[in-house]
Amino acid sequence: MIIESRTDDTGRALLAVRGELVHGCDEALARALAGLPAGIRRVEVDMSGVDFMDTAGRRFLDLLREYGERHMIPVAAVNWHGQPRDFWELCREVEQLRRAMATRPVIDQARGILMATHACTSHEAWEILREASQLSNTKLRTVAASVTASAEDASTAPPEEVDRALRTAVARVRG
């Protein structure tokens, strides 16, 4: 992998990457970033020359993000195409699936509680949770956790806005 670096008079550094993002690519990026002059106000990494990226590419992108945070400047990886973009989208999908798997049990428990409490179907319980989430502007998994917590301990009531949204949703779905 080759990284060519140039700066412009606006304080932007443009790093053009060519080759494959594989093991060791983060070290090459670290060297390129360390070689940037003082006063850089933005870093853009042109990914148009990248034709392959494996899991090491994620470390490359994490290093870029960390650099921006450490120097308090915006950073961006631009001009994605083909497989590297597909890989990054796949990483996002995997992360979303992991979150879904972690939150699914509490959502299923809340649906069961709503079904037993309000004599509704599984679909209706889902609609109650979904609508309560939207009405209270609260993540669905948080609404579900509130429902299960209040079922486990009667003294643990959902937050007022969630409780109000749940009552509204139940009335609409069951009414």
Image (cartoon, helix red, strand yellow):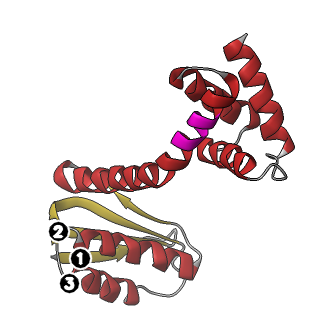
Q: Is residue 129 above or below residue 61?
A: above
Q: Position of residue 85 (x, y in %)?
A: 26, 52
Callouts 3 and 1 close, C-beta under 8 Å: no
The numbered mark, 3 or 2, whose residue comes first in the sequence reads 2
Magenta span: predominant SS is helix
Give the residue displayed 49% in from the left and 48% down from the top: 105
106 sits to left or right of 100? right
Query: Can residue 26 be found in the magenta stretch?
Result: no
Q: For marks 3 and 1, give the CA distance.
A: 13 Å
| Number of on-image labels | 3
Return the residue at label 3: 24
130 sits to left or right of 138? left
Query: Can residue 109 be found in the magenta stretch?
Result: yes
Q: What element carries label 1?
A: strand
The numbered mark, 3 or 1, whose residue comes first in the sequence reads 1
Callout 3 amino acid: Gly
Return the residue at label 1: 3
Q: What element carries label 3?
A: loop
Q: Residues within 10 Å of mark 1 (few under 14, many from 20)?
A: some
Magenta residues, start to end: 108-113
Return the residue at label 2: 18
Residue 80 visible: no
103 sits to left or right of 72? left
